[in-house]
Image (cartoon, grey):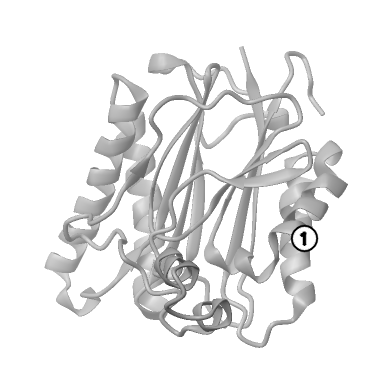
Amino acid sequence: MHAFDHAARATKGARDYQEDASGFWPPETGAAGKADVPTANATRLVAVLADGMGGHTGGALASRMVCDSFIAAYAGRNGARHERLLEALQSANDAIASKVMANPILSGMGTTLIAVVFADDGVEWVSVGDSPLLLYRRGEIALLNEDHSLAPELDRLAALGRMTPEEAKSDPRRHMLRSAVTGDDLDLVDVSRHPLALEPGDYVILASDGLHTLETTEIERTVSAYAKDGSEAVASALIRAVEAVRDPYQDNTTVVAVRPLANGDGA
């Protein structure tokens, strides 16, 4: 039976407000993330991260609502984890729709979403938007989920020779979202097909797109340097690395780090 060490850290960046939100279920897990969670299908931990949009009030409200609604919906359901993930996503989307209907001034608010379920047989996830879900394994970082911004499309055009790589990287449309949780129909949803087994030393990292300030090699170096110190150290180090760049336009950045613990490992 696995336990999971987890932590979340955030920075406002260059902004004077925070539109990111994150959460865990169960919310109280005791020392080092250890929890005996009596849930269907051996769910040990759920981690959720959302990056809101729609201005100071709307974005912050959307991200918090979606995290809370998703966790409540997932916790209140039984059945296959794959189905629970999709049902909880729809519930979170419905919560945004209901809020906008009740208060039309909030029209246009929305958020990205990553939700990851950690269980004895591995991790499963659902995501909407461009917030990255990363796997750190043996010194390397891999992107697990789809990017629903225009960035992949622009990179594809560059690969076809229709624009230069430099033009693709600097295109102002690069961060426009093709899908988000707004209360409308969900255009694109990425959901895992089967559990991804974790290995000792792995980290699963959920992040808002502010982490893109760091190159993949810098993320790899940072996680490698602090991996033995636990999830709090890793999440804090990544946030410090983002702040150290001193980007005058730095977006909000939130990092959630989770690692599996060997049985009896409290470190």
Of residues 131 and 265, the one nearer the viewer is 131
Residue underneath mark 1: 218
**From the image, which quarter does the C terminus lie in?**
top right
Q: How many marks?
A: 1
Which residue reaches farthest front? 161
Q: Secondary structure at mark 1?
A: helix
| Residue at image location 38% in from the left, 80% down from the top | 55
Q: Is residue 185 above or below residue 265?
A: below
Of residues 219 and 111, the one nearer the viewer is 219
| Residue 202 appears in the figure | yes
| Residue 76 appears in the figure | no
Q: Is residue 256 above or below residue 169?
A: above
In-image side of 222 versus 5 (left or right)? right
Q: Is residue 192 above or below residue 169?
A: above
Q: Is residue 15 above or below residue 154?
A: below
| Residue at image location 29% in from the left, 44% down from the top | 89
Which residue reaches farthest left? 101
In-image side of 155 versus 185 (left or right)? right
Residue 23, percent across and down? 50, 47
Residue 217, percent across and down? 76, 58
| Residue at image location 74% in from the left, 46% down from the top | 232
User: What amino acid type is highlighted by mark number 1?
Assistant: Glu
Residue 99 picture quarter: bottom left
The 10 Å Cα crowd at callout 1, few under 14, some 14 to 19, many 20 or more, is some
Residue 244, percent across and down? 79, 74
Residue 83, percent across and down? 28, 28
| Residue at image location 24% in from the left, 53% down from the top | 93
**From the image, which quarter does the N terminus lie in?**
top right
